[in-house]
Each structure stands twice: as C-alpha cells, then as structure tokens.
Image (tube, helix red, strand yellow):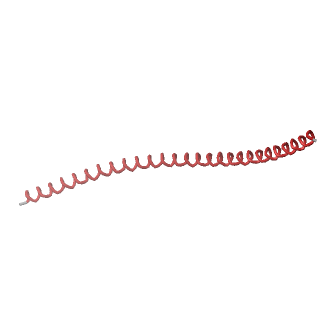
Amino acid sequence: MSEERFDRIENTLSQLVTMVGTILEEQTAMKEDISEIKAEQATMKEDQTAMKQDFAEIKQEQAAMKKDIADIKQEQAAMKADIADIKQEQAAMKKILLS
C-alpha cells in the first residue's frame, strides 16, 4: 500500500514539475513578447515625434507661403493701380495730341 502511495506522490510531483516547467516557458515567452512590444512602442513614439516635427515644419512653410501670397496680391494690386494711372496718362496724352 505504501508503494502505491509513493507512486501517486511521485506522479503528482512529476506533474507539478512539468506544470512548473511549462509555466516558466510560457512566462519566458511572454517576457520576450513584452520586450518586443516595448521596443515597437518606443519606435512608434519616435516616429510620432518625427511626424509632429514634420507637421510643425509644414505649418511654418504653409504660413510662409500664405504671407508670400499676401505680398504678391499687394504687389499685384499696386501694379493694377500703376497700370490704371498709365492708362489715364495715355488717354490724356491722346487727347492733347488729337486736339
């Protein structure tokens, strides 16, 4: 009877050791997965930071372009005014020449 009992205890201990080994393997795999996820997350954060910098630069360039467009529009308005003045002067000269 005691040999059967020892066999059951031995089987139980064997199962426990196997279970502990399996759990340790799974735990090691999970730690590796977590490390990979952390590395990917760090890479994503770096990419996100780079994208934020790019967006900031694009916004600055866009603001500069808007200013340039506003300046061009002012120059264009000034040129239109100059052309209108020249046309008036031409009309006045034609009037003088025709009289």
- State left or right for residue 81 relative to residue 47: right
- State left or right for residue 15 relative to residue 61: left
In the foreground, 98 or 70: 98
Q: Residue at x 68, y 48 (%)?
A: 66
Farthest residue to the front: give it: 99
Q: How many marks?
A: 0
- State left or right for residue 29 relative to residue 84: left
Q: Where residue 12 sits: x, y (%)?
A: 17, 57
Q: Quadrant of the N terminus?
A: bottom left
In the foreground, 63 or 93: 93
Farthest residue to the left: give it: 1
Q: Residue at x 65, y 47 (%)?
A: 60
Q: Where residue 8 sits: x, y (%)?
A: 12, 58
Q: Residue at x 65, y 45 (%)?
A: 61
In the foreground, 73 or 94: 94
Q: Where residue 81 sits: x, y (%)?
A: 81, 47
Q: Quadrant of the C terminus?
A: top right
Q: Where residue 26 sits: x, y (%)?
A: 29, 51
In the foreground, 96 or 99: 99
Is residue 33 placed above or below 6 in the rendered structure? Answer: above
